[in-house]
Amino acid sequence: MNNAREDSQAYLQKKRFFDSLMTVYGRKIVLEALQDSSTYIYRLHLAKSNKSAEILDEIITLAQHKGAEIIYHERQALSRISKNATQDQGVAADLQLRGYQHYDDFLRENSKKNYTLLALDGVNNPQNLGMIIRSACAGNIDGILLPQKGNAQIDPLVIKASAGTVFRAPLLRCKDLTEALLDFKKEGALVCALSSHAATELKKFTPNAPCIYVLGNETEGVSPAVQQLCNESVKIPMNNGVESLNVAVTAALIAFR
């Protein structure tokens, strides 16, 4: 019985470790990740069919220097790892990033702090996601709640738009945004929507509790299910007949409010 419990605990720890890895692909992206001193690489995956190239030599040298395990695969096997056979260029890497974690780890470690988060509810444009990550990393944002479904996910377009800050940004993974928001609310966090009808302006909003600002879809806005969880709302005043701002611009205003 004890062995089964110990095996189960070991399995859960192993699963949690692999869940904490971010897989990136493409030669330039992997090289940029390896050149960032803040990244730890667990495994480098290479296609056996790769032809000799200077950039590959540099990738391998950096991976070896960082102590990575290097594995060679058939192309089909590599495509299952990268999940993008047309763009992986025969290279993928499993990274362990200091800011990439499951939201419940963040919640456990910061339960007594007045943190500020962004929650992404249907942000589908990779460039918007990248720019949001860049602003959050540069500004006063403690984490970005990024659901596994319904949003753009980390890919070369996002990494490029983030100017590489994705490797240092505080990204909080969750399967379902509504479930994650409920967990944060149970711990006393406010969930705040951006609305043109709100009475309070963003620059005058001074919450005395942890606060999560929800950024909705570029066209539809915040989903009804998430809107129901919001217990605060703020507005960004507009001039000259402008009705709304790009979601990435809104994120920047929140990050530097």
Image (cartoon, rainbow, N blue to C red):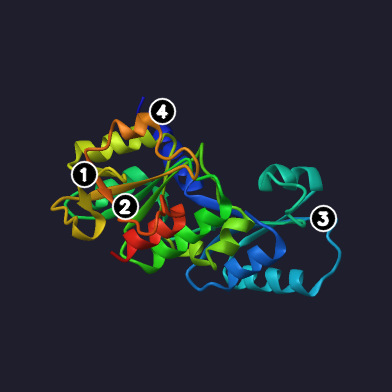
**Kind of residue indicated by mark 3:** Lys
- Name which of mark 4 and mark 1 comes first in the sequence: 4
The crowding category of the residue bearing disc 1, from other C-alpha atoms within 10 Å (few below 14, some 14 to 19, many at least 20), is many
Foreground mark, 1 or 3, reads: 1
- Name which of mark 4 and mark 3 comes first in the sequence: 4
**Kind of residue indicated by mark 2:** Leu
Residue linked to disc 4: 4
Residue drawn at (18%, 59%), measured in percent from left and top? Answer: 204
Label 2, label 3: how many angstroms apart (C-alpha)? Answer: 42 Å
Report whether 84 appears left or right of 137.
right
Foreground mark, 4 or 1, reads: 1
Q: Is residue 11 above or below residue 21?
A: above
The crowding category of the residue bearing disc 4, from other C-alpha atoms within 10 Å (few below 14, some 14 to 19, many at least 20), is few
**Kind of residue indicated by mark 4:** Ala
**Kind of residue indicated by mark 1:** Ala
Residue linked to disc 2: 117
Residue linked to disc 3: 48
Residue linked to disc 1: 189
